[in-house]
Amino acid sequence: MPTELVTGNHVAGYALSVSGEANRTARGAVCGIYPITPQTEIVEYVAKFPFSKGRVVPVESEHSAMGVSIGASLAGARSFTASSSNGLAYMVENIMVAGFYRLPIVMVAVNRTLGPPWNIWVDQGDTLMLRDFPWLQFYCESNQEVLDTTLLAFRLAEDHRVLLPTLVAMDAFIVSHTQSETVLPEQALVDDYLPGLDLPQRMRADKPTTMGGLAWPHETLSHRLEVDEAMRRVPDVFEDCRRSFRKTFGRDPGAAIQTFETEDADTILVATGTIATTAREVVRRRRADGEKVGLLKIKMFRPFPEEAIRAACRTASRIGVIDRNYAAGIGGVFWQDLRAAFQGRRNDLIIQDYLAGIGGGDVTPNILDEVLADLALRSQAEAPRWMGIDTRQEVH
C-alpha cells in the first residue's frame, strides 16, 4: 500500500471514492455534493473520481445534497456526502430523515464554528448539534484515522445488525488542510473489505411500497425502539469491523475509546480530535515527572461508550474533560455525557469541564497544564471553566 503526503480532505475524498467504487458490482455509488469551506476539497476530489458505476450530483444546497444521498440510498446505491458548519445546519431536516429511514449513508464532516459571527475555524458544535439523531458519530485525530474510520464506517453502517447512517468528523484546517504521511489502500483491498451493499428496505419496481407515510403513535414507538436496539448493537459490530479491518489492511483503525497511561492514573484528561495529540504529550511529560496522569480519547461519540469509559477511569479520582464545543446554558457536550455515565456509580469522582479551543483557538500544552493545576486543587466540580480567555474583560 502506497504512503503519500496528503491532507485530511484528500484522504477523506479518497476514502469516499474508493468505497463507492467498491460497490460497482452491486448498485453503484452516488454522492450529492455542495461546497462549503473548509470541506470543499473533499467533494472536489469525489467529483473528479472516475466511477465505473456511479454518479456525483452537484446541487444547489446542502439540504439537497443529503436529499440526493437519501434517494440514491433508497434505490440501493452506496451513498455518501460531506459538509461542515452552517451547511450541516441547513441539511438538518434531511439528516434526520436519513437516520429514521435507517439508511447507511456515510458523511464526512469538517468541524467548523457555527455562525454568526462568521468563523471558519474548528469547533465541534456543528456535528454535536446532531447528537440526538439516529446517526453514529466518530471523531478523528489524524489524517490516517480519517481514512481508516471512513472505510470502516461503510462496513459498520451497512451491517444488517445496524443499518444506520454514520458521520466521520475531523478538525477544520488542523487536519483538513494539513499534510501528513498517510497509507492509501489500493482499490483491490477496499473491494475485499467492503462487500456489495444489500439494503433490505430498498425500493423495488417489482414490489411497490411507500416510504415516510403517516404512522400511528404505537408504530412510531416501535420504530424508535428498533433504532435503540440497533444503537446498542453497535459496539460489538464495531469490534467485528475493526477485526476485519486489521486482517485486510494490516493495521488497527483504533478502538472506540483509546487510552494512554490510564492503568493507575488518579487524574485523567478526556479529549477528542487533535486536542488528544497535545494532551498525550502533556501526559507523557507529566509521567516523566512522576505524576499519575492519563489520557482518555473518545473516538466514538454515538453511541456513547459508557461501559468502556467507566472501565478506563476506574482508578481515577479526578477527570478533566476538554470540550471544544459549548451548549448554551449547560457547558461542554462531552462533559454532559461523561457525567451521566457515572451518575449514581461514583460519589468519590470529580468530573470538571474545561471549555478550550472554542471558535478555533489553539489548545496549547500551557492551557492543559493550567487544566491539570486547577483540577489538582479541586475538592468538587463546579461550573464549566473557560480556558484561553480572560472572562473578566468586557466583551464588545
Image (spheres, helix red, strand yellow):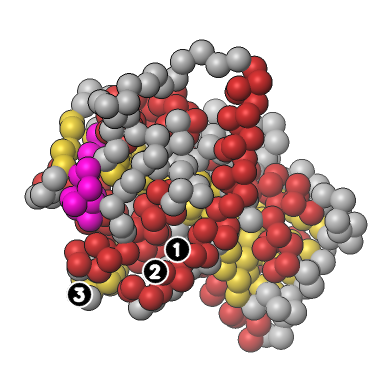
Q: Where is residue 201 drawn, in percent x and y? A: 40, 34
Mark 2 burial class by Cα count in 10 Å: few <14, some 14-19, many 20+: many
- In this rendered view, identify the residue nearer to me: 238 or 66: 238
Q: Where is residue 130 drawn, in percent x and y? A: 52, 35
**Can you identify the residue that label 2 sits on?**
245
**Can you identify the residue that label 1 sits on?**
241
Which corner quadrant of the image does residue 288 belong to?
bottom right
Q: Amino acid at mark 1?
A: Cys
Q: Name the residue rendered at 35%, 66% in the picture.
A: 144
- CA gap, disc 3 and disc 2: 17 Å
Image side of residue 284 versus residue 361, left or right: right
Residue 27 colored in magenta in the image: yes
Using the image, determine if residue 189 lies above or below residue 45: below
Query: Of callouts 3 and 1, which one flags the residue occurring earlier in the amino acid sequence?
Result: 3
**Can you identify the residue that label 3 sits on?**
2
Question: In the image as oriented, which residue stretches furthest toward the front?
Answer: 206
Which disc is residue 326 wearing?
A: none
Which corner quadrant of the image does residue 189 belong to?
bottom left
- In this rendered view, identify the residue nearer to me: 278 or 271: 271
- CA gap, disc 3 and disc 1: 23 Å
Question: Is residue 259 among the parts visible in the rendering?
Answer: yes
Image side of residue 10 versus residue 254, left or right: left
Mark 3 burial class by Cα count in 10 Å: few <14, some 14-19, many 20+: few
Q: Name the residue rendered at 36%, 63% in the picture.
A: 148
Query: Of callouts 3 and 2, which one flags the residue occurring earlier in the amino acid sequence?
Result: 3
Q: Amino acid at mark 2?
A: Phe
From the image, which quarter does the N terminus lie in? bottom left
Using the image, determine if residue 61 lies above or below residue 111: above
Q: Where is residue 232 drawn, in percent x and y? A: 62, 49
Q: What span is in magenta? A: 20-32
